[in-house]
Amino acid sequence: MRIIAGEMGGRRLDAPPGAVTRPTAERVREALFSILGPPAPGLIALDLCAGAGTLGFEALSRGAAACWMIERATPALRCLRANVAALGVEARAHVRRGDALALLRRWDAQAQRDGGGPRFGWVFLDPPYRSDLGPRLLACLGQGRLLANGARVVAEHDRRHPTDLRYGCLIRTDCRRYGDTELSIYQTDEQTDGQTDGQTDGHTDEQPDGQPTSAPNPSSTPPALEPVSAIQKQPMSDSSPTIAVYPGTFDPVTNGHVDILERSLELFDRVIVALATNPRKQPVFTVEERVGFIRSALASRQDKLSFDSFDGLLVEYCKRQGARFIVRGLRALADFEYEFQFAHMNRRLAPGLDTVFFMTDERNHYVSSSLVKEVASFGGDITGLVPTEVARALAAKFAASRE
């Protein structure tokens, strides 16, 4: 088990023996952090029922200022503390022994009493699948007093036991399925300012030791984007936001892709760049790197742009996201024949889903990711075919492989 990306990317993590803990799989973590994006400055994370701490350490590696990891099982605690020491993050990783729900209620009571206590930007919870602890933790967090503005709460649970759409100020904005595992992603409702008028239920549990210091001012957290899944539940009318999905591997993104995205952003209210998992292709760049390249190339258009990865049928993914349009680019006649076939199949599978084609700019009509990689692998000049950051990254990768 290893940390996927960031300053500690590739570092190994120890896991406690036995089947008591259930570390989040690497592909699930990679998809999750692509959805979350980079942390806001000063963001503090909370990993409840931390187990081996895979999500907490991943958050630290990607730039979280600190992370509190809560665990009650002795073997997992030993492992967590050993990982903290091995990674050298004692100043940022705070391991506490105790009951997750009791600790949350203690902090919430303090916040209700005097406004003190922590303010978390990311919260991860992965309780035992067969318990009712997940909904109880979400209900406590939904009071809002422990959450920064625009906070994200990620609940991992068995797909056969779905969570509710709303818990207090928390609204479920996304739901992803990976086999029997489901990730429900919640965000604070900005209309409530991350606070609710609800009271704690007065339940008292054994108090865990220690509590975190207050987090930085939550006003430093940027406002959240409009939830994609919330749009899905709105009635389709002329006033409904139009959501389009632009699927592809984007390995790497080319100037042709950027051109299509810029034009589609003029047409749709929201465009989701969906990075497809293709088992027949061995990608040069990770999902996170590819998302980073696209973000950099379209830095001024982030308000209408979302990123995600998916596998399975594209039409099923579009349904889950409430998208009514698929964006595709056409370069030549051969592209048309290929896309024509798939557009009709997608239309047959989902009659309400349309494919919108953009003709590529004449400067990019011959450019493809595979051609760019082939030229770059031989040291050829790809200036003007891909964003500058991509050109540098490709040159570095292939230079290293030739050494």
Image: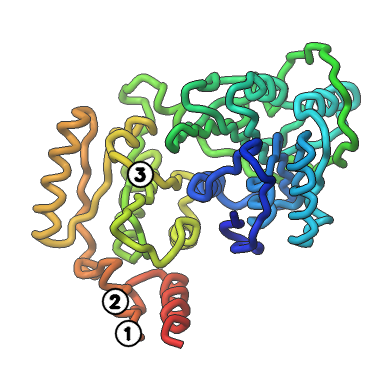
**Few, some or many C-alpha atoms within 10 Å of disc 3 (few <14, some 14-19, many ≥20)?**
some
- The answer to whether any part of residue 150 appears in the image is no
Spatial separation of the CA atoms under disc 1 and disc 3: 32 Å
Residue 200 percent coordinates (x, y): 79, 15
Residue 76 percent coordinates (x, y): 74, 42
Q: Tag 3 or tag 1, which sits nearer the N-term?
A: 3
Residue at left 70%, top 51%?
64
Residue farthest along the front direction in this orientation: 18
Residue at left 37%, top 65%?
252
Q: Is residue 204 above or below residue 177?
A: above
The quadrant where residue 249 appears: bottom left
Q: Nearer the viewer, residue 161 or 336?
A: 161
What residue does disc 1 label?
Answer: 378
| Nearer to us: label 1 or label 3 | 3
Q: Which mark is residue 301?
A: none
**Few, some or many C-alpha atoms within 10 Å of disc 1 (few <14, some 14-19, many ≥20)?**
few
What residue does disc 2 label?
Answer: 374
221 with respect to 93 (left or right): left
Badge 2 marks a residue whose secondary structure is helix
Query: Are the residues at dot 2 and dot 1 in contact (C-beta closer than 8 Å)?
Result: yes
Residue 29 percent coordinates (x, y): 54, 47
What residue does disc 3 label?
Answer: 311
